[in-house]
């Protein structure tokens, strides 16, 4: 059981969950009280000692089902009943016979004759690292590993030894009919051994594939180019975006370090020191409130940046659950606020509606100058020294007037102005892009073509 | 130490715990029973997480009744410090006593003829004013120094500061409290500890490692039905099934506040009061305010009325 459990913990870690050795020990202790008989209790006992985060539970459940299939895994809890027919199973008689005769047989042969499939798989599985089973990642490799394991078992030898043994038994005068029954039993056991081996491999394969796919998903999602996503794929990225938002939230809620104290707080000090009768041994200071960021995001939703904007809207939608105040605006030729839209609608709908730009009047060509001027005229009052402004767009102005002074006004009032451009930097000087013209007013200008880049920009700039 | 808790709890299996809880009208899910069972056997605290209103605090309350232990509750909040959670010196009392005993003290100190001797005398008195007599135990210290074993509920531990977690961990790991003036106080009895969290922030790894983890989610429809039948027996079966189905549907929607179990029960009670034989769109419309408390949520819920009408009513 230790090996099985250690392997399971190893799998959990491979899936990205951090399980400490102390927790693994707890799991063992828990099992000693709960027992292996009932699968659901077994699972609960493991879950409570190994999984400490609500969101890790689905991964645990999936891996549990893969690792504890109840079939080929040795000592498995509440495994499926074996397909033996007790009346015809003479394995126990064979076992007795072996005890009496004490022939010189290999361990594997003995196990197969006796029908000890549990210990057999345990033996194999114990050698699995040496056999390289951790490299089994595709069904195409199954046969290769099957051959390997067969060699390991050396089934030909088993066959030979079993025959020899039966010959001996026959020559010692046992009823030939009975010998035939024993021979059949051994043949059945051999077949069973092969199918157990196959099942062992299939389980390993399933586990390896699960972990492999998880890794790929994580890496892949970070690198996928946002501009190339279809609408459905954008929504598929929601879990990854939520993870980013959550990470952000955790970083933001880290409190100020001890020692960073504010001004002397006379009221609290006096109250605290009433018991000292006029002395003030315990001084109290006002806590410095951590600066919860306030965000204003302006998102270009014109056709030229369609996929990028859909993704960004998804991100903004998710962000509102993390950051205290996020106000989202969409623009093309003019600007409109979508904060309420996000509040009242489901994520898919909200993103679709915002991207459809129905609240905008001019929906053809992006006009940054007009947009910034309108913002500066109508919404500048919401920008203050705690605000960070995000501008999400490709800065392609269609040769309209850029009105840099409007952007300058916005930047002047805000704490930071961050521009996220889906295009790579070399493109910023080409065509109608006015990125370089706007750059002086921006605190940060960054390319944001995939989730990883977005991650980096957010972490570097949103954390106070 | 574990013998103490084993005999104190006396449960043979998780099933026993479920039976005991049922007597107090709390339907305990299987996995929760296993965790409670292990918590007693392994002497580990439980960290209960889950959405609001799902029964986390009640779990601790019923547990204390089942175990016949006093419940000590520590409600956490931002800025909760040692003084409020662990212990405090009763300064006022100390000052008072020293005033009252002033004469006696000068009597004692009138003996020695020089300063060093006087100092020695004073030092020998020090322990008198910093003894347990003047110690005001707060919930954590009270829990471990109680002569009878108690149940300790640390409610909404995610609202506390990371600094609080540090001395909470000291109590939970060794069941001791270090008081600089006195020394280390060890536990007289080991409390059964339950921590609840609404997940507004992540707890520290050390704390999570120390505890067993229990995720309480909203119950399945069948389980919720059981709960209603237990607590609001006057409700017609048909209506009970209808409201359970509707609540389940509502919980799948993105609402500002999903209806909790207590709200389901309130609704059931309201319907009993209205003598409803079955749920109609009218009754649903009138009583929706019992389970949804935000205007936005009410609006969204009303939007799916046609769907509900088709499938459930």
Image (tube, coloured by chain):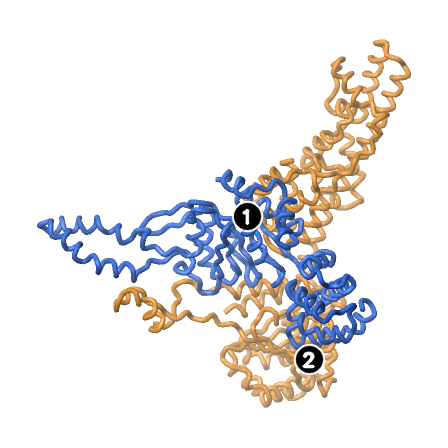
Chain colours: A orange, B blue
Q: Above or below — where is A175 with respect to A312?
A: above
Residue B33 coordinates in the image, percent (x, y): 63, 48
Please identify the quarter of the rendering in which residue A425 is found. bottom right
Q: Above or below — where is A115 with respect to A254?
A: above
Instruction: Please tell me how crowded label 2 is: few (under 14), some (14-19), or many (20+) other residues with Cα within 10 Å.
Output: few
Q: Above or below — where is A231 with respect to B72?
A: below
Q: CA distance from mark 2 to mark 1?
A: 76 Å
Which residue position is annotated with label 2? A431
The reply to whether residue A13 is in sight is no
Please identify the quarter of the rendering in which residue B308 is found. bottom right
User: Closer to the camera: disc 2 or disc 1?
Assistant: 1
Q: Chain of mark 2?
A: A
Residue B234 coordinates in the image, percent (x, y): 71, 62
Which residue position is annotated with label 1? B67
Residue A34 coordinates in the image, percent (x, y): 63, 40
Instruction: Please tell me how crowded label 1 is: few (under 14), some (14-19), or many (20+) other residues with Cα within 10 Å.
Output: some
Q: Residue furthest left?
A: B113
Residue A421: image tag: none
């Amino acid at each position: 059981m230790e090996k099985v459990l250690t392997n399971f913990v190893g799998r959990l870690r491979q899936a990205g969950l951090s399980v400490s050795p102390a927790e693994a020990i707890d799991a063992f202790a828990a099992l000693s009280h709960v027992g292996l008989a009932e699968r659901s209790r077994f699972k609960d006992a493991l879950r409570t000692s190994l999984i400490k985060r609500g969101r890790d539970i689905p991964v645990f459940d999936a891996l549990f089902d893969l690792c504890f299939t109840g079939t080929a895994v040795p000592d498995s809890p509440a495994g499926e009943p074996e397909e033996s027919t007790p009346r015809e199973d003479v394995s126990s008689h064979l076992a007795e016979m072996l005890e009496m005769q004490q022939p010189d047989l290999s361990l594997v042969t003995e196990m197969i004759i006796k029908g000890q499939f549990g210990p057999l798989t345990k033996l194999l599985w114990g050698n699995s690292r040496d056999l390289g089973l951790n490299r089994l990642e595709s069904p195409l490799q199954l046969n290769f590993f099957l051959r390997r394991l067969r060699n390991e078992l050396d089934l030909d030898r088993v066959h030979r030894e079993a025959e020899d043994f039966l010959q001996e038994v026959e020559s010692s005068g046992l009823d030939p009919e009975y010998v035939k029954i024993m021979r059949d039993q051994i043949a059945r056991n051999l077949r069973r051994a092969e199918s157990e081996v196959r099942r062992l491999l299939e389980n390993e394969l399933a586990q390896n594939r699960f972990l492999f796919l998880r890794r790929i998903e994580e890496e892949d999602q970070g690198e996928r180019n946002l501009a190339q996503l279809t609408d459905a794929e954008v929504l598929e990225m929601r879990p990854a975006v939520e993870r980013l938002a959550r990470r952000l939230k955790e970083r933001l809620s880290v409190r100020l370090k001890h020692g960073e104290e504010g001004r002397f707080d006379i009221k609290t000090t006096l109250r605290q020191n009433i018991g000292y009768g006029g002395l003030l041994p315990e001084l109290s200071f006002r806590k410095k409130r951590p600066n919860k960021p306030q965000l204003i995001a302006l998102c270009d939703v014109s056709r030229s940046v369609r996929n990028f904007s859909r993704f960004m809207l998804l991100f903004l939608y998710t962000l509102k659950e993390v950051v205290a105040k996020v106000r989202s605006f969409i623009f093309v030729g003019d600007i409109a606020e979508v904060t309420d839209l996000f509040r009242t609608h489901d994520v898919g709908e909200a993103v679709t509606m915002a991207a459809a730009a129905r609240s905008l009047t001019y929906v053809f060509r992006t006009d940054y100058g007009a947009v910034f001027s309108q913002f500066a005229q109508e919404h500048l009052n919401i920008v203050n020294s705690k605000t960070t402004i995000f501008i999400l767009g490709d800065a392609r102005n269609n040769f309209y007037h850029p009105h840099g002074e409007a952007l300058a006004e916005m930047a002047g009032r805000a704490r930071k102005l961050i521009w996220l451009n889906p295009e790579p930097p070399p493109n910023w000087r080409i065509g109608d892009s006015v990125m370089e013209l706007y750059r002086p007013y921006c605190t940060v200008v960054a390319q944001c073509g995939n989730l990883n880049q977005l991650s980096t920009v957010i972490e570097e700039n949103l954390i106070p | 130490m574990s013998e103490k808790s084993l005999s104190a709890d006396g449960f043979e299996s998780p099933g026993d715990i479920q039976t005991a809880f049922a007597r107090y009208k709390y339907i305990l899910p299987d996995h929760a029973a296993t965790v409670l069972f292990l918590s007693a056997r392994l002497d580990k605290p439980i960290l209960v997480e889950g959405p609001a209103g799902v029964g986390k605090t009640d779990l601790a309350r019923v547990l204390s009744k089942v175990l016949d232990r006093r419940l000590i509750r520590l409600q956490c909040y931002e800025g909760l410090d040692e003084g409020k959670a662990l212990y405090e010196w009763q300064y006022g009392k100390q000052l008072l006593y020293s005033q009252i005993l002033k004469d006696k003290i000068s009597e004692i100190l009138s003996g020695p003829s020089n300063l060093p001797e006087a100092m020695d005398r004073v030092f020998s008195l020090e322990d008198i004013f910093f003894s347990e007599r003047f110690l005001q135990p707060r919930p954590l210290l009270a829990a471990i120094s109680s002569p009878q074993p108690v149940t300790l509920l640390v409610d909404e531990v995610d609202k506390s500061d990371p600094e609080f977690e540090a001395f909470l961990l000291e109590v939970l790991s060794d069941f001791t409290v270090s008081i600089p003036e006195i020394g280390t106080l060890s536990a007289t009895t080991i409390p059964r500890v339950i921590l609840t969290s609404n997940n507004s922030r992540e707890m520290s790894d050390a704390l999570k490692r120390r505890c067993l983890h229990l995720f309480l989610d909203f119950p399945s429809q069948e389980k919720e039905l059981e709960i209603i039948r237990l607590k609001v027996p006057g409700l017609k079966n048909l209506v009970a099934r209808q409201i359970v189905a509707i609540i389940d549907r509502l919980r799948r929607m993105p609402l500002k506040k999903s209806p909790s179990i207590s709200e389901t029960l309130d609704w059931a009670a309201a319907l009993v009061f209205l003598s409803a034989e079955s749920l109609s769109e009218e009754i649903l419309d009138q009583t929706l305010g019992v389970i949804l408390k935000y205007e936005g949520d009410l609006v969204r819920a009303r939007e799916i009325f046609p769907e509900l009408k088709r499938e459930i009513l």
